Image (cartoon, rainbow, N blue to C red):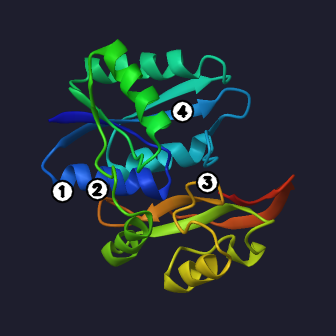
Amino acid sequence: MKFVMSYSCGKDSTLALHKMIEAGHVPVCLLVMVKRDADRSYFHGADMDMLQKYEAALGLPMILCPSAGEDYHTALERGLLRAKGLGAEGAAFGDIDLEGNRAWEEARCRNTGLTPLFPLWQRGREDNVRELIRLGYRCLIKSINHTLLPESLLGRCIDPDAMRLMKDAGIDVCGENGEYHTLAVNGPIFKTPLDFQTGEILRFGDYSVIDVK
């Protein structure tokens, strides 16, 4: 099946894209939700320059969907319709087990005539992280909840040592509760790795974010 990947630039959507390709499906494009007032991707904070680099590194055209928040659902649906115009028959998402998220995405697909696809659904959360490491993906830790995790994790790629630190902290190592966010920067589906550099650490309430360019 030809599909559009709802892509956040993070580890889960990257693994979902990998699994879809592994299963024989054909990606036609990536769909990325963008914060209109910040010109960065939602949740993982990739800026416009970095999103262009992702488009080249993954070898797929990218549909950017700007949203101020209250129009998030309609912005996504407009993007899905554009993907449909490129030949997409289905839309893939990186959700694992949150029923509310899945139901919301299924509704967006019903409204646009696309088949919803969830390649990671009901897989073990920790199993997903271990598979990413085993497959050779490099996933940079971009932000953390510093009330739960040490800032020393920022700018590191997830590896067994980072996983142990997360388990010792008592958090979900997949970060499904927002404990941390990542940017995937290299791996089997990347045609070229993302060349990046990290900068200063910024703090916003309970969260610390490392600048990545």
Locate residue 69, reporting x and y percent: 66, 24
- Decide which of tag 1 and tag 4 comes sooner along the chain: 1
Locate residue 45, reporting x and y percent: 64, 47
Label 4 Cα neighbours within 10 Å, binned few <14 / some 14-19 / many ≥20? many
In this view, the residue in front, 161 or 140, is 161
Q: Is residue 52 above or below residue 110?
A: below
Label 2 Cα neighbours within 10 Å, binned few <14 / some 14-19 / many ≥20? some
Secondary structure beneath dot 1 equals helix
| Location of residue 132 by image quarter | bottom left
- Decide which of tag 4 and tag 3 comes sooner along the chain: 4
**Residue under label 1:** 22
Q: Is residue 101 above or below residue 66?
A: below
**Residue under label 4:** 33
Quick check: marks 4 and 3 in contact, CB under 8 Å? no
Q: Amino acid at mark 3?
A: Asn
| Location of residue 187 by image quarter | bottom left
Q: Amino acid at mark 2?
A: His
Which label is found at residue 177?
3
Query: On the rendered structure, is 66 left or right of 212?
Result: left
| Location of residue 212 by image quarter | bottom right
Locate residue 50, reporting x and y percent: 56, 49
State how far apart marks 1 and 2 are (Cα): 6 Å
The quarter of the image holding the N terminus is top left
| Badge nearest the viewer, 3 or 2 | 3
- Decide which of tag 3 and tag 2 comes sooner along the chain: 2
The residue positioned 48% from the left and 60% from the top of the image is: 184
- Decide which of tag 4 and tag 2 comes sooner along the chain: 2
Secondary structure beneath dot 4 equals strand
Quick check: marks 1 and 2 in contact, CB under 8 Å? yes
**Residue under label 2:** 18
Quick check: marks 1 and 4 in contact, CB under 8 Å? no
